[in-house]
Image (cartoon, grey):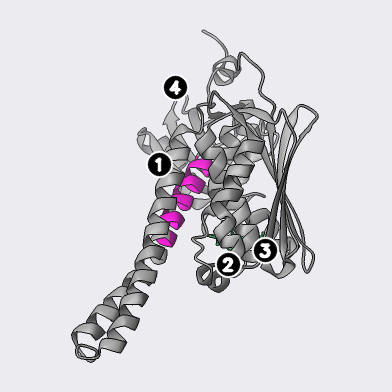
Amino acid sequence: MSSANEFLAALPDGGLVLASDGSITAANAHAKDMLQLRLTGLSAFNVIRLPAFSEAVEKCAREGSAQTVELEIHSRPPRLLEAHVALLGQDGSMLVVLRDLTREQQIERMRSDFVANASHEMRTPLTAILGTIETLQGPARDDPKARDRFFSTMLTQARRMKRLVDDLLTLSRIELNEHVRPGGRVDLADVARQARSNLLGLAKEVAVDLTVAGADGAIVAGDADELLQVAQNLIENALKYGNGGGKVEVKCETRGGKVVFSVRDWGKGIAEIHLPRLTERFYRVSTQESRARGGTGLGLAIVKHIVSRHRGSLAIESREGQGSTFSVSIPVYTSGI
Ligand code: ADP
């Protein structure tokens, strides 16, 4: 029979062996890492100072039945652990298996935040459409002028809902494929020119001069449709939020084994505190401004996921009052990827 230490070392989770009085007689590296302490020799009740844990150990010692409890450890950063306490032998010693649930808890929280945000985003245009229909059935029934105005409101709101649903579907499709590296051969300069031609109408509308400078050989392994989406989302943002500057410059360069695709605007820029959060779903500097410009708050989240699928990176440089540069770097195509 191997020693307790060898047994604990083979466990994929945190493991402690306690004597009947609760003192720790053996601990593996995972447990030391989770509890951020050198454990052997200490009392488990001093290491994990939570009544739920002491109760579980005492109940296990008293009744001999295995106990499972969740423990919120107030470390920095805080952790959520699940402790499974079971009797080991006749001498009253106990085995404590610790599973770190922190990541699962974070994912669960993100999922419920996401559902709450998405529902809220949907409800706003839906409420506007319902209100408009009620008005059309009642006070505006016989007023052709008011009717036209209300139909146009309904169209705007329905389009907003459609954009939101389209973006949500795009996001979930990309997430499903994120671990599969795309294998096509894509010229990013072509993609940039295509994006420009698709967005020339919008550029004209907001009176922005949209230019593309593309070097030859800007070839990456990728999915052409997804990369076009990246280019369009970044250029569209530059046109929407950078229109004070009058011009938007798109560049495609090859540097150090990477193709760098960048979009520069001279608009009002973004304050530094927002930069780390911009690619979170539904994060906006100003919700009102984003909505007024037809934004869903998902454009940069989509960009981030596509770029990550292409093993690339996204960099954002911006200064308030001086505009922004969004740069995507993707490894140059090499055969055999
Ligand atoms: P949205 O649909 O709101 O445009 P995005 O995910 O594309 O969503 O962008 C998130 C937020 O980032 C925007 O609401 C805006 O506040 C900010 N942003 C994005 N691009 C720019 C830019 N070029 N200049 C200034 N702010 C920008």
| Residue indicated by mark 4 | 89
- Few, some or many residues within 10 Å of mark 3 (<14, 14–19, 20+): many
Q: Are marks 2 and 1 in contact (CB under 8 Å)?
A: no
User: In the figure, 99 relative to 184: above or below?
Assistant: below
Quote the CA–CA distance across marks 3 and 1: 72 Å
Q: Are marks 3 and 2 in contact (CB under 8 Å)?
A: no
| Residue indicated by mark 3 | 208
User: Residue shown at 72%/61% (left/top)?
Assistant: 247
Mark 2 or mark 1: name the one nearer the start of the chain: 1
Q: Main secondary structure of the magenta part?
A: helix
- Give yes or no for residue 109 being in the magenta stretch: yes
Q: Which residues are magenta?
A: 101-117
Give the mark toward the camera: 2 or 1. 2
User: In the figure, 193 relative to 320: above or below?
Assistant: above
- Few, some or many residues within 10 Å of mark 2 (<14, 14–19, 20+): few
Mark 1 or mark 4: name the one nearer the start of the chain: 1
Quote the CA–CA distance across marks 2 and 1: 72 Å
Q: Amino acid at mark 4?
A: Gly
Callout 2: SS: helix
- Few, some or many residues within 10 Å of mark 1 (<14, 14–19, 20+): some
Q: Nearer the viewer, residue 258 or 87?
A: 258
Query: Does residue 50 appear in the picture of this structure?
Result: yes
**Residue 164: quadrant of the picture:** bottom left
How far from the left and from the top, in percent, is residue 291? 50, 69
Q: Is residue 273 left or right of residue 142?
A: right
